Amino acid sequence: MFSAPSNLTNGQANGTHTLANGATDDKFRLKAGLAQMLKGGVIMDVVNVEQARIAEEAGAVAVMALERVPADIRKEGGVARMSDPKMIKEIKAAVTIPVMAKVRIGHFVEAQILEAIGIDYIDESEVLTPADDVNHINKHKFDVPYVCGCRNLGEALRRVNEGAAMIRTKGEAGTGNVVEAVRHARQVHSDIRRAQAMDEDELFTFAKELGAPFHLLKETARLGRLPVVNFAAGGVATPADAALMMQLGVDGVFVGSGIFKSGDPVKRARAIVKAVTHYKDPKILAEVSEDLGEPMVGINCDTLPEGQKMATRGW
Amino acid sequence: MSSPLAVTIGVLGLQGGHAEHAHSLLNVARSHALPPDVQLSVRDVRKPEHIADPSLDALIIPGGESTSMAIIAESMGLMQPLRDFVNLHKKPAWGTCAGLIMLANHATHTKQHGQSTIGGLSVTVDRNAFGSQRDSFVCDLAPPPFSAPSSSASSASPSATVPASAPPTTTPTPFPGIFIRAPLVSSIDAPSVLTLCTVSHKGHQGPVAVRQDHILGTAFHPELTQDTRWHEYFVNMVVEAKRAAAAGQGGSGSGRAKAGAALEERVG
């Protein structure tokens, strides 16, 4: 039986709700708890030790170790797989912050390998080429926590039901275009607000409509937020993009290609970290947005052929 | 009845589990664990002016990533105000996990170029002492001393014995200690540091809750549980400090203190 992590509240909840969240399952409590500690932070994609150190020095709360950032996966094509464990171990040895890595959707053996080398968080990611086009990994079987992507509330709650301890809205990775990230975050939050307005009778039907497990939907409606930490991902390229996602109500931000595909990664990484901390303060956002050099070029999502959209992967 | 005592506790909101701490404090305020005259309010702290505000009585530094927190604090000019708050004005402070690392005078296994800290707590802390996330664990710990709800403020002073003896007859229920990539106090570097609880887990052992005067540090996460006893303990620390400061200023102190205050007024 699922119960939400303790004291995970929605941003505005200070004192307005009396929550009695009591996660009884210790294993899940540890998994979700690490995500709670990452809130208000930026998780950066890095492809080598040097970039990992830049990310750590900039104040990233974690790094995502991978061989190619999504922008390069797009450009080069072919099958994208889990990264070489050797390179992940090198990055793990180089930094003290948590290290995450990606596995293909449904590829539980890649996940076993990452668990064996002591990775801190696994991203079952649509950015890699799916290994199973029907099932996701049964994440309850693992001690290592998982983060999974979603485009709407139903998808988010299906992943939580499979054992994900953290969610990220998908966006469209490797485009440098925030439009899909905004679409997905808005969709999740609008689904939650609809659920909050329903009585229990209606929630049964809404659960069917969303393809979400009823008990998780009910818990979501009670909390007024996803029952695990939720970051934004996929297309964040500027401090303003990051603050936009925070103001839309996510708990933190993943930045993939946006930093190391830009003109001045060190400066941009620091600026995005500050923007996430002070996401409600336009004066600070203006300061950190100044003189950042070239952003990543970016792709218009409307012109992206259907086959190249990553967000539609996931079932 | 004495007039209400307003107590304001800030939670450093740069990153990490600050909302969880605020929520736990509000749960304490809602419960009847506090002395009846205490009015507790909770505040988000992220800028130098928030820390400099004289109405801020105490600060919680939450869990999160200590490197990120230190870098953000440094870049926002927060580090010196934080050091002044804790070490110059000696206002009560509590660090959990990353917060403990920030308050410790020394930390080992820090990132490549080291990391800046607030300091004040005379201990050495080993970062990620237990390993990576798969080594995170939950275990039973001794509860904070005198954690049973007590209406008399005078009974809340910590005893130097370790662990402090519980109130008569009741055996305290253990506290659920949540350790997530947690640090461990590897050495205590001053006699005034009290060990409030220890852990022994897979070959690692040592103090995981320590107090030195007005500074409290815990390696685990009470804010990730529904158990508010550590939050009650800290609020009581703050209440005591505030009452002591008020007495020192002559508000309710001895006749001599009152005379002193009156004299000051005339001189002023």
Image (spheres, coloured by chain):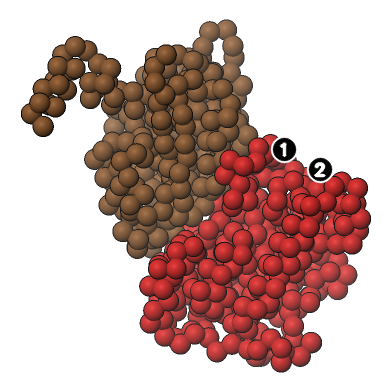
> Contact (CB < 8 A) between labels 2 and 1?
yes
Question: Does the rendering let one see residue B168?
Answer: yes
Q: Which mark is residue A1?
A: 2
Identify residue for label 1.
A24
> Does residue A131 sit above or below A196 in this rendering?
below
Question: Does the rendering let one see residue A89?
Answer: no
- Which residue sits furthest top? B169
> Dot 2 lies on which element?
loop
Nearer to the camera, A124 or A16: A16
Chain depicted in red: A
The residue lying at 67 percent from left, 57 percent from top is: A166
**Which of the 4 image quadrants contains residue B176?**
top right
Name the quarter where the C terminus of chain B is drawn: top left
Q: Residues within 10 Å of mark 2 (few under 14, many from 20)?
A: few
The residue lying at 69 percent from left, 53 percent from top is: A225
- Which residue sits furthest left? B267
Name the quarter where the N terminus of chain B is drawn: top left
> Dot 1 lies on which element?
loop
Give, as a three-letter code, the residue at label 2: Met
Question: Tell me, what hue is chain B?
Answer: brown
